[in-house]
Image: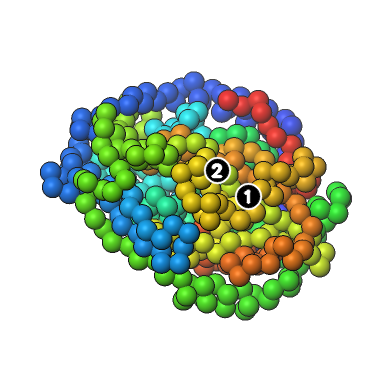
Amino acid sequence: MPRRIAQSVSAGDETGTAEFDRWFDDLRERRAMQVTPVPLDDLSGWSTHPDTGVIRHDSGRFFTIGGLEVHVPNGPVPQWSQPIINQPEIGILGLLIKQIDGVLHCLVQGKVEPGNRNGLQLCPTVQATRSNYTQVHGGRPVPYLEHFRDTARHRIVSDVRQSEQGAWFRQKRNRNMVVEVTEDIEVIDGFRWVTFGELHRLLQAEDLINMDARTVLSCVPFAGPEVTAVLPAGGDAFHAALLASCSGDGGLHPMTDILSWVTEIRTRTEVYTREVPLRGLPGWRREAGRIVHESGRFFDVIGVDVRTGTREVGSWMQPLIAPIGTGLVAFLVARIQGMLHALVHARAEPGYLDVVELGPTVQCTPENYTVLPSAARPRFIDTVLAARPERIHFDTVLSEEGGRFHHSRNRYTVVEVDPGPEYDHPDFRWVTLHQMADLLRHSHYLNVQARSLVACLHSLTATGRATRRTDRP
C-alpha cells in the first residue's frame, strides 16, 4: 500500500489542478449557505436548563455545552473553569480510495459547514456524527455511508479512533477510516475522485482542505522503504531527509523509548476535571445573547441560524464555539542521523481521554498570553515567530472543524532548526515521520493538530517545499 500511495502522490499535473478548480468554483456557486447569528436563547430546537445553564438539543442527541472545572496542580495555570462541548457519540470520518487507470484516487466531497469562514471546503467521503447518520434530524441519508458500516467486501486500509480538540471537547473521538473499493462507484454531485498528489498540492491553499480530511489523510500508511523507491530524493538535503524520515528505520529515540516516555508522562501528569453548571461559571458571563470570557479572550459561545438547500436538512439552528484570534500550530524539525525529526510536545488538555497526547512543538493562540501568566507562554514560540523565510518549509492558514467552531483558523507551519541542547526538555522528544505513522495506527497518541501537521509534512514529499496557493479565497 505505501508504494501505491507514493505513486499517487507523484501523479497529477497542472491540467488536473485546473480541472479541479473549475469543478470547485462551479460547486461553490451552487452550494450556498446562509448563516445568521442569533441569541442563544432564541435557538429553535435547543434549550437552556433553568438551573445549570447547560445548552442541549431537544432530542437529547447531537451535543451539549456545559461547564467544566479544571485543576492541573503542577501546571502554569493550576486552575480554571470554562464551557466545553460534550459529544459522547463516535462519528465516522471516512475516505474511499480506488485504483483508477493504475493510480490510487480518493473520493472527496465539497461541503459547506456553518462555521466555515469561506463556505465550501474539501472533506472526506463521509463526515458524519452518529446522530446525523442515524438520521435523528429526519433528513436525507449520508451518501456512501454503507461502505464504512459494512466493510466485508472491501479492504480496510486504516481504521482507528482519534481524539479531537481537547481544549474544547470533552473526550470527543471519531472513527478515522480509509477503505479501498474495487467495484464501480457512482459519483454523485458534489463528489470527485482526486489523487493523493492533488490533495497534497491543495493542502497548500488556505482554508481548502478541512480538518476532518487532514486527520484521515494523516492516518494513511505513508511509510516504509517503498516511499523512497517511488519518490527518489531529487531535491535538496531537506527533501532527502524528509523521505528518509518517511521510509527509514530507526531514529534518535527507539520506539520502545518513545512509548515508555509517553506512558511515564501520562502517569505523572495530574489533570482533574469536574462537570459544573454553565450558569455562574467563574470568569464567564452570558451577555448580548452569547457566552463570553470576562477578559474578552479565548472564545465565545454563539448561536447561529443556518439555511441551505444542499444538506441532509434544509435549515437548523445550533450553538458554536467562536475562538478569538488566529492560532499558531508549528513543528520544529531538524535533520538528525540523516532523517528529518519533528519535535513533539507531550501536552495535557482537559478534554483528553488519556490525560496527555503528543502535540506540535507550539500550539497556541499568541494573543491569549496577554491575559495569562508569563510562565504559561509556550516554550519555543519565539523560535517559530522569528524564523527566517528560508527555514520555513510549510506555512498556510487552515480551518478547524466548521460544524462546531465558528471561523476557527490556525497558521500551520513547519520550521527547520539545527539540533542542539536547547531543545532538550523532559516534555519534548524528537521523532521521525515513520515513528509517527506507527503511533497513528493506535488511538490517542497524536492530537488532531499534530495529525494535521503530519499531513502537511507528507505534502512536501514530492518537492520538499510547499508552493503556497493564494489564488483561492
Residue 395 figure quarter: top right
SS for tag 2? helix
x then y, percent, for residue 2: 68, 60
Q: Which residue is drawn at 61% across and 27% down?
A: 472
Image side of residue 278 versus residue 155, left or right: left
Give amino acid for label 2. Answer: Pro
Q: The C terminus appears in which quarter of the rendering?
A: top right
What crowding class fits label 1: few (fewer than 14 Cα within 10 Å), some (14-19), or many (20 or more)?
A: some
The answer to whether residue 384 is visible is yes
For the residue marked with disc 1, what is the amino acid? Ile
Q: Where is residue 233 in the image (x, y as percent from the top left)?
A: 84, 54
Residue at 73% x, 71% y is: 252
Reading the image, the residue beneath label 2 is 366
Q: Which mark is residue 235?
A: none
x 28%, y 48%: residue: 282
Which residue lies under the disc numbered 1? 381
Which of the two residues, 18 or 322, is positioned nearer the viewer here? 322
Q: Is residue 187 left or right of residue 383?
A: left
Q: In this view, does 51 lie to the left or right of 416?
A: left
In the displayed orientation, state which residue is furthest to the front. Answer: 374
Judging from the image, the colouring scheme is rainbow
Mark 2 crowdedness (10 Å alpha carbons): few <14, some 14-19, many ≥20: some
